[in-house]
Image (cartoon, rainbow, N blue to C red):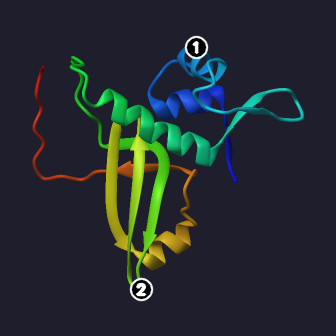
Amino acid sequence: MQSYTIGQAARLLGVSPDTARRWADAGKVATHRDEGGRRLIDGRDLAAFSIELAQNVSGEDDTSYTSARNAFPGIVTAVKLGDIAAQVEIQAGPHRLVSLLTREAVEELGLEVGMQATARVKSTSVHIDRT
């Protein structure tokens, strides 16, 4: 299972490393130490925490002045395999992205919960709102 440093987890969650460290210190997400003494977060724990975090933030009135980019780096939070098709969910900071793709593609990529992945969005029409 892949593990993430505090800095990597912070980037995936869309927060500063200090914020991720404070969450770890408060016990909001479990950590363990590697041979070098660095604190690491298990990928499955980070995936579960990212879902919890997004659910708690989604109801807040958070003003944003940025336009979303086409690449959303995040962590895989769910993989549902069918006979031919598959559904993959990625939590990229406060954004939950769901992609439908072939089972073969998921298997070739080796996607599983807790892995780092980037969702790329291609659209013929982009709308930008300033709130």
**22 relative to 112, above or below:** above
Residue 18, labelled with which disc?
1
Q: In this figure, which residue is indicated by the disc labeled 2?
A: 83
The picture places residue 20, in percent across and down from the top left corner, at 57, 22
Query: What quarter of the picture does the C terminus occupy?
Result: top left
Image coordinates for residue 5, horizontal then vertical, percent? 68, 32
* 25 in relation to 128, above or below: above
What amino acid type should be assigned to the residue bearing mark 1? Asp
Q: Quadrant of residue 126?
A: top left
Quarter occupied by the N terminus: bottom right
Check the image and report above or below for 29 versus 121.
above
User: Please, what secondary structure does the residue beneath circle 1 have?
Assistant: helix
Which residue is the extreme one toward the right? 35
Q: How many marks?
A: 2
Residue drawn at point x = 48 percent, y = 70 percent: 106
Q: Is residue 11 left or right of residue 54?
A: right
- Among the two numbered marks 2 and 1 on one chain, the one whose residue lies closer to the N terminus: 1
Q: Is residue 94 visible?
A: no
- Mark 1, Cα crowd under 10 Å, few <14 / some 14-19 / many 20+, is few
Query: Which mark is drawn over residue 77?
Result: none
Taking the image as shown, residue 34 lies to the left or right of residue 20, namely right
**Residue at horizontal 60%, vertical 48%?**
44
Residue at the spot x=42%, y=32% of the render? 53
Q: 10 Å neighbourhood of mark 2: few (<14), some, or many (≥20)?
A: few
Check disc 2 and give the amino acid type: Asp
Q: Of residues 19 and 125, which is closer to you in this image?
A: 19
> What is the C-alpha distance between the residues marked 2 and 1?
43 Å
Does 57 sit left or right of 11 as displayed? left
**76 to 23, vertically: above or below:** below
Residue 82 x/y as whole percent: 41, 80
Q: Residue at x 83, y 35 (%)?
A: 34
